[in-house]
Amino acid sequence: MITSVRLAHLLLKECIHNGDIMIDATAGNGHDTLFLSDCVGDAGTVIAIDIQAEAINATRQVMEIHQRSNALYILGDHAAMNDTLKEYEGNIAGITFNLGYLPGAIDHTIITKSSSTISGLNACLTLLHEQGCISVIAYRGHDHGLEEAHAVEQWMHALPSQEWHVVSISAINQSSTSPVVYFARKKSLRPQ
């Protein structure tokens, strides 16, 4: 079975090109940052954001092990992306969120929350370029996870259909708390 992370990566790969700028809005243990780094190549940049120093350090270590030097690291909240990344407005190819808590962390009380996630998603609207994409993996099995997934789904559902392609993908024969992948991509406004 394909994992939710692998599925999100497959969708993201469709909208990433060599030289692009991508944002990993929840750096975690660095696996998404590494994936994005490989996709954008040496000419591109990945901006890895996390509120936990432990996550930024883990991400930096993964990148060093794989000899990747095309990442910028921000210890901060993805809810503040509009302010911290203002210089990138309209130039980001894609932004990915892998919600929940830091895998392997001792403290599972530090989790993403609906309010900051929605603020981060709102920031995507100004940061993305005209064919940019957003990937969100929501884990519904932890405290507040179901609430957060519902908030993300409502946000995605409200995107104008004439401007965005939006899908959600989840296993239909698994627990109702299994992860769900949300993916949105801007429609090109240029005639083909």
Image (cartoon, rainbow, N blue to C red):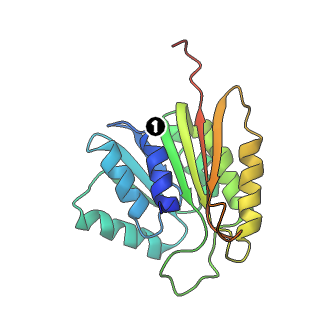
Taking 148 as reference, is 55 above or below it? Answer: below
Tell me where residue 117 sits by quadrant.
bottom right
- Percent from the top left, x then y, of residue 22? 44, 45
- Percent from the top left, x then y, of residue 61? 31, 70
Q: Give the left or right position of residue 72, taking residue 183 as reference.
A: left
* Label 1: few (<14), some (14–19) or many (≥20) C-alpha neighbours in 10 Å: some
State the residue in front, 115 or 168. Answer: 168
State the residue in front, 80 or 113. Answer: 113
Tell me where residue 180 sits by quadrant.
bottom right
- Percent from the top left, x then y, of residue 176? 71, 68
Tell me the amino acid under the disc marked 1: Cys
Q: Give the left or right position of residue 114, taking residue 55 as reference.
A: right
Q: Residue furthest bottom?
A: 106
At a point 50% along the width and 42% down the height, the residue shown is 94
- Percent from the top left, x then y, of residue 189? 59, 19
Q: Which residue is mark 1?
A: 15
State the residue in front, 94 or 14. Answer: 14
Total marks drawn? 1
Q: Residue furthest top?
A: 191
Q: Residue furthest front?
A: 173
At a point 77% along the width and 66% down the height, the residue shown is 147
Q: Mark 1 falls on what kind of element?
A: loop
At a point 61% along the width and 65% down the height, the residue shown is 179
